[in-house]
């Protein structure tokens, strides 16, 4: 099987994951979002596909983001709490990732697309080259990985 295109929809706040922005140095709306990973829960473990853009990818290139559209950090009830709303098209060869493919079946194709942030086109990293700590996850909402 070759790579296939899939759609991820976290467009509305009810379908989006929420975060607590903890960075004092950067404003969330001044950074560029990218998908750092796509996770799936098989009921026992989480399985992840890693983007080559993620600073800690270590050569992994499990999927390609074709489009990341309509990104908006929508303010939630609390201070510095946001819903990360967006839609995306990604390309994945699931045959290269049999554990992830099996987890997708067990979860009815439910995934979490994790957002990382870039500044001036480069992923945000600390002095040691690790992803910079900008936010804490608050609440996860899974979205169906579809082909339409």
Image: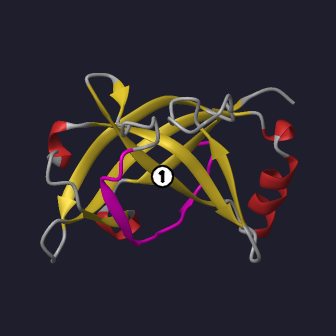
Residue at (79% x, 68% y) in the render:
106
Residue extending furthest top?
121
Q: Residues within 10 Å of mark 1 (few under 14, many from 20)?
A: some
Q: How many marks?
A: 1
* SS class, disc 1: strand
Residue in the foreground of this view, choosing between 135 and 12: 135
Provide residue 126's location: percent of width, then percent of height: 36, 40
Provide residue 20's location: percent of width, then percent of height: 27, 67
Look at the picture and state if 62 lies above or below 79.
Answer: above
What kind of colouring is applied to the model shown?
A: secondary structure
Provide residue 87's location: percent of width, then percent of height: 41, 45
Provide residue 13's location: percent of width, then percent of height: 30, 65
* Residue with the mark numbered 1: 114
Left/right of residue 74 with respect to residue 115 in the rendered view = left
Magenta run includes residue 95? no
Left/right of residue 34 with respect to residue 59 in the rendered view = left
Stretch in magenta = 132-148
| Quarter of the figure with the N terminus | top right
Residue in the foreground of this view, choosing between 110 and 48: 48
């Amino acid at each position: 099987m070759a790579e296939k295109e899939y759609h991820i929809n976290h467009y509305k706040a009810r379908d989006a994951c929420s975060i607590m922005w903890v960075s004092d140095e950067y404003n969330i709306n001044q950074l560029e979002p990218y998908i750092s990973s796509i996770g799936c829960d098989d009921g026992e473990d989480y399985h992840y596909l890693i983007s080559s853009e993620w600073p800690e990818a270590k050569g992994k290139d499990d999927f390609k983001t074709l489009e990341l559209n309509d990104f908006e950090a929508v303010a939630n009830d609390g201070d510095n709490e946001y819903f990360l709303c967006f839609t995306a098209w990604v390309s994945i060869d699931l045959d290269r990732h049999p554990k992830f493919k099996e987890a997708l079946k067990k979860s009815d194709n439910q995934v979490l697309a994790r957002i990382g942030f870039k500044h001036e086109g480069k992923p945000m990293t600390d002095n040691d080259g690790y992803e910079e700590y900008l936010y804490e996850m608050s609440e996860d909402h899974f979205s169906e990985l579809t082909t339409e």
